Image (tube, helix red, strand yellow):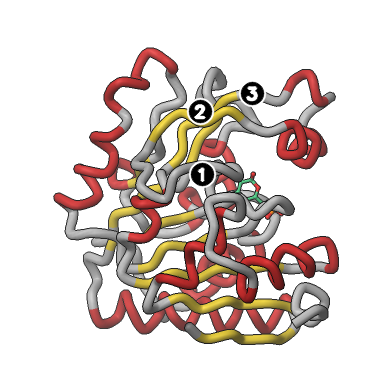
Amino acid sequence: MSIVINTPERIAQLAAQEYVALLNKKPQAVLGFATGSTPLALYAELVLLNRKGELSFCEATSYNLDEYIGIDGIHEQSYRFFMDRSLFNEIDIRMEKTFLPSSSIADEAHLAEFDCEIEKAGGIDIQLLGIGRNGHIGFNEPGTPFASSTHVAKLTESTVQANSRFFLSADDVPRFAATMGIKTVMHAHAIILIALGAEKASIVKTALHGPVTEAVPASVLQLHPFVTWYLDYEAAALL
Ligand code: GLP
């Protein structure tokens, strides 16, 4: 495990260099992407580097961590819409090689196939993660078994409240989401977790230095051999 502490802008640049190194060595890399406000600066940096020709996504495949259940890809708060707008439409990735878990509850029984598809593609080379204030990764809320594969998760009330800032009201936030499981995430060859801001300081400390427990999903990352935690000074304040 390594920990990089810097400003949010510098973190975006440093983390982007991991993608430059990977894609230049392995153009057909498999990338695991995340949503939320945290990865936005990194995505902007990747767009810039792609335009400058320093890296290309044209042979890459991507799998996203999660997607809300019950809103489709044209809904502005769907993670498909978010990814298209903040990254996929702006880079040279082939849209048909960008995958998110299905937002349809009718597909629930088939969600574990998402993991099979990832494995068939060779496994995720870099999985990007943010962290919820309660320690969730993807939508794996506290208590999710470490052995979980991609599944439908019920959002906790604290996550609904945290994510309501993107919706008209908390009532509009979907209560369920399809998410890669913790086992799915842990199968990635390498993981980048970015945490920014004082509101993440307490959970960062707990996840990094507290016991490894299903009560704190991100604590499982202590068991992964290649995780880099990119923290700004505020998120690292309690370390
Ligand atoms: C959501 C996503 C997570 C993300 C988290 C933190 O719930 N499902 O993948 O890490 O929010 O979001 P933010 O980066 O906006 O703090």
Could you classify mark 1 by the number of other residues whose Cα lies within 10 Å: few (under 14), some (14-19), or many (20 or more)? some
Instruction: Please tell me which residue lies in front, 37 or 191.
Output: 191
Disc marking residue 175: 3
Could you tell whether 27 is left or right of 151 in the image? left
Mark 2 or mark 1: name the one nearer the start of the chain: 2
Q: Residue at x 18, y 53 (%)?
A: 121
Residue located beneath label 1 in the image: 84
Could you classify mark 3 by the number of other residues whose Cα lies within 10 Å: few (under 14), some (14-19), or many (20 or more)? some
Q: Is residue 218 above or below residue 76?
A: below
- Mark 1 belongs to which amino acid? Asp
Q: Is residue 109 above or below residue 59?
A: above
Instruction: Please tell me which residue lies in front, 115 or 169.
Output: 115
Instruction: Specify whether residue 58 is in view.
Output: no
Q: Position of residue 10 (x, y in %)?
A: 67, 84
Q: Residue at x 41, y 75 (%)?
A: 19
Mark 1 or mark 3: name the one nearer the start of the chain: 1
- Mark 3 belongs to which amino acid? Arg
**SS at mark 3 in the image:** loop
Total numbered labels placed on residues in the image: 3
- How far apart in space, not on screen, are marks 3 and 2 (Cα)? 17 Å
- How far apart in space, not on screen, are marks 1 and 3 (Cα)? 23 Å
Instruction: Look at discs 1 and 3 and give the one toward the viewer.
Output: 3
Q: Position of residue 39 (x, y in %)?
A: 61, 61
Mark 3 or mark 2: name the one nearer the start of the chain: 2
**SS at mark 1 in the image:** helix
Could you tell whether 230 is left or right of 29 in the image? right
Q: Residue at x 77, y 30 (%)?
A: 167
- How far apart in space, not on screen, are marks 2 and 1 (Cα)? 9 Å
